[in-house]
Amino acid sequence: MTEQNAQNNQPPRQIAQIALVTGASRGIGEAIAKQLAAQGCFVIGTATTENGAKQIGDRLADQGAGRVLDVRDTAAMDALVKSIEAEFGAISILVNNAGITKDGLLMRMSEQDFQDILQVHLGAVFHLSKAVLRGMSKARFGRIINISSVVGQMGNAGQTN
């Protein structure tokens, strides 16, 4: 049941598609979340801060919700997917959009920065995709969309990652 429905003592509405968009507080993720909501999806957008999650929820209004998520934390990803499934139903659309940059020269990049980049750009995609697949398989419908940077095709000087 959505918070708004719970506050108004209304039964939960039937939602056709549940979409999870990581990195939805700004930029491409924000635009994707808005478009999915405009197409009739109920969108859960994630941000790394409470303020970012609140802004997502405010923008989506009754078409979605904002949640805090650190995509480097596998337990947090599992907990989020379980809470979404319990509250709204199975996730049918996953947009792996969260990304970070630690631009600089390779010789100056720390091991921790390297690990953070791998976890956000690769680990989170693997883990979230795996976490939503059971619900998608059961529903016999699902879409997983992975967003990447153009820098992945042709880098620039000083962009180690």
Image (cartoon, rainbow, N blue to C red):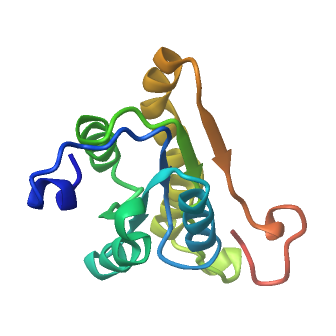
Lateral position of residue 53 relative to residue 153, left or right: left
**Residue 158 or residue 87, whichever sits in front:** 87
- Give the residue drawn at x 57%, y 17%: 140
- Give the residue drawn at x 72%, y 60%: 148
Q: Position of residue 86 (x, y in %)?
A: 23, 36
Lateral position of residue 90 relative to residue 88, left or right: right
- Give the residue drawn at x 42%, y 61%: 63
Q: Position of residue 30 (x, y in %)?
A: 56, 72
**Residue 73 or residue 57, whichever sits in front:** 57
Tell me the quarter of the image containing the C terminus: bottom right
Among the 4 quarters of the image, the one containing residue 160: bottom right
108 w.r.t. 89: above or below: below
Tell me the quarter of the image containing the N terminus: top left
Total marks shown come to 0
Among the 4 quarters of the image, the one containing residue 61: bottom left
Lateral position of residue 136 relative to residue 14, left or right: right
Among the 4 quarters of the image, the one containing residue 3: bottom left
- Give the residue drawn at x 51%, y 50%: 41
Q: Position of residue 116 (x, y in %)?
A: 48, 62
133 w.r.t. 15: above or below: above
7 w.r.t. 95: above or below: below
Q: Residue lying furthest right in this view?
A: 154
